[in-house]
Amino acid sequence: MVMELTGEEPETPIDCPVLVTERLVMRPPHVDDVPDLAGLANNRRVAEMLARMPHPYGEAEARAFIAAAAERRFGCVHALTLADNGAFVGCAGLNPTDRGLELGYWIGEPFWGRGYATEAAQALVDLAFRTTVIDALNVSCRVINPASRRVIHKCGFQYAGQGMLNSIVAGQVPVERYRLDRRTWIGLRAWSPGTTRLMSA
């Protein structure tokens, strides 16, 4: 899933509480995450699927990312941690772009294939529609990323065309764009209501 920021930041204020799903605690990233964040993000296979992640990625980049996340006025960023042991597994967020609010996520390679991206994405889709007045949520993925495409489909997004992404690592690459409108979200609710708990940050 590409995490993309483009153009002027539209005003999309979002309450960003801690989210607790079946297996994840989704919370703001903090300095204690630096070693784990740097370890998982320092992976070209992850970075080349994203817009803004550099490679190599060390503790300096992790600290800069965490500081920027804390200063954001719009959108939100969550560290994804396992509920049973607190292990850091990736990041996810809601990002203002020139197309509107966009869902973004990445999971560290040791944790691929376990459904964590889908669990986090569904929680953030619900958060976006419950706490803002947006009519639609956007998401995109590189055309060579079938795993992210599966996550997007599981969340109910509909194909909206192709575009180009300027990735720090991969350069100009084609992406597929998807869109989920509020009416479809209300009608689908493929994941059970109430499976995500909101906690005060």
Image: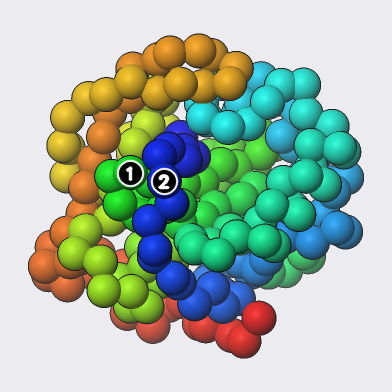
Decide if residue 41 is in sight here. yes
Residue at figure coordinates x 60%, y 42% from the top left:
107
Quarter of the image that includes the C terminus: bottom right
What residue is pinned by disc 2?
A: 8
Q: Residue at x 37, y 78 (%)?
A: 131
Instruction: Indicate the amino acid at tag 2.
Output: Glu
Mark 2 surroundings within 10 Å by alpha-carbon count, few (fewer than 14), some (14 through 19), many (20 or more)? few
Indicate whether 186 appears above or below 99.
below
Quadrant in which the N terminus is drawn: top left
**Residue type marked 1:** Asp
Using the rendered image of the protein, determine whether residue 79 is visible from the camera's viewpoint.
Answer: no
Q: Nearer the viewer, residue 129 or 157?
A: 129
Left or right side of 41 for 184: left
At a point 13% along the width and 63% down the height, the residue shown is: 184
The residue to which callout 1 is attached is 98
- Mark in the foreground, 1 or 2: 2
The foreground one among 115 and 74 is: 74
Occupied quadrant, residue 150: top left
- Of the image marks 1 and 2, the number of the one nearer the N terminus: 2
Task: Count up the numbered dots.
Answer: 2
Residue at 61% x, 26% y: name it. Answer: 47
The x, y position of residue 54, in whole percent, is 68, 26
Q: Check if mark 1's residue and mark 2's residue have beta carbons within 8 Å.
A: yes
